[in-house]
Amino acid sequence: MTRLEEQCREGLEPSYKFSSYMSEWLYSDDGYYATYKEIGKGGDFYTAVSTSKFFGGTIAKHIISLVDEGFLAKDATICEIGAHHGYFLADVIEFLYTLRPELLESFDFVIIERFEALREFQKNYFAESFGNAIKLTHYKSLSELKCKNAFFIANEIFDAFSCELYYKGKSARVERHEVVFDVNDDWVEQKAKKYHKDRGEIALGYEEFAKEMALACEKFEFMSFDYGEMQARPDFSIRVYTKHEVTPFFDEKIKRDELFARSDITYDVTFEHVKDAYEEAGVEFIELSTQMAALVKMGILELLEILKAKVDEKIYKQELEKVKILIMPNFLGERFKMIRFRKS
């Protein structure tokens, strides 16, 4: 039971800043992300990872290119942040084995995962998949990690940071799942003005996250995929996902008390805010591009050609259709963006 539910049962009138309410929804002991969740057809939503192994395969190809250009050492740390099932990193490892198998012996593989239940799932999955062929280490947070050279990867992480809701000078609080805009918050107002918003979401934690990463490793590249735009949206994008249905958070018909902690809640990322946070931490912004452009540039089509030469036509066409979902503009190709940073 969450703290909000406990207070409601006791007849109290809980009042939360929205960021605390969202944290309870997603990250409390009984929150949505605290336990294993099926992703894909049987779950609440799709991700690029659940769509095709070639998503992770393309990242593996990029990692090899970083080794070849001398940016990544052969004993570098390959770290996924917020791995959930661990499938993404596992796909990266599988393709590394195919394309450059000796790197499995020299790389250190790391997952940053705050939830114990998910760490156990990941450990079991990797043990079943790879046995003792790789070295996998878990940390609860980036602050526990110290390394010299690394490649960090994350998929749909920045949209899961808690946020404040802002409307014409006032921030939101929540009472019994009802949103009220009457809070004065100077930090939120400064961010809203900086990103030219009179309403919408103001993410919390980007600055601390960037600083933690900068302190965790001396030299690294960080790549993340998420949905959003460089500039802030002019309206609210916050919404709830459940069983592949999307409901705007302010929809009159939404039953927040029933969806609380039982569904995903998310919003569009303002990548300019992410960029500023990393640059303030002394990390260089490299690029923002569509997922389609990023995956094609990193070689997803070349990987498909390798597959085509080794399997029958039916299998090739099946994988091709999955890759199309990743890169076609009317699917995930344009809506999702890749952002990349380097600390040298």
Image (spheres, helix red, strand yellow):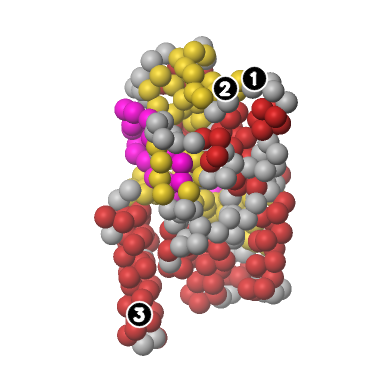
Residue bearing mark 1 = 13
Q: Position of residue 86 (x, y in %)?
A: 59, 60
- Tell whether label 2 touches label 3 (CB within 8 Å): no
- Left or right: residue 32 compared with residue 246: right
Q: Secondary structure at mark 3?
A: helix
Q: Reply yes or no: does residue 231 show up in magenta.
A: yes
Circle 3 crowding by C-alpha within 10 Å: few under 14, some 14–19, many from 20:
some
Specify which label sits upstream in the sequence, 1 or 2: 1
In-front residue for pair 6/69:
6
- Give yes or no for contact between labels 1 and 2 (Cβ–Cβ under 8 Å): yes
The residues bearing labels 1 and 2 have C-alpha atoms spaced at a distance of 7 Å
> Badge 2: few (under 14), some or many (20 or more) residues near its Cα, within 10 Å?
some
- As drawn, is 84 to the left or to the right of 114? left
Reply yes or no: does residue 164 show up in magenta. no
The numbered disc on residue 160 is none
Residue pictured at 59% horizontal, 41% vertical: 261
Give the residue number, with chain letter if any, for mark 2: 175
Q: What amino acid type should be assigned to the residue bearing mark 3?
A: Tyr
The residues tagged by marks 3 and 1 sit, at their Cα atoms, a distance apart of: 58 Å
Of residues 102 and 17, the one nearer the viewer is 17
Disc 2 residue type?
A: Glu
Residue 277: x %, y % from top left: 49, 32
Q: Is residue 69 visible?
A: no
Which residue is the site of mark 3? 316
Q: Position of residue 43 (x, y in %)?
A: 51, 57
Q: Secondary structure at mark 1?
A: loop
The residue sitting at 51% across, 25% down in the picture is 178
Q: Earlier in the sequence, mark 3 or mark 2?
A: 2
Rendered position, 189 above or below 40? above
Q: Which residues are magenta?
A: 218-241
Does the CB distance between marks 3 and 1 fall below 8 Å? no
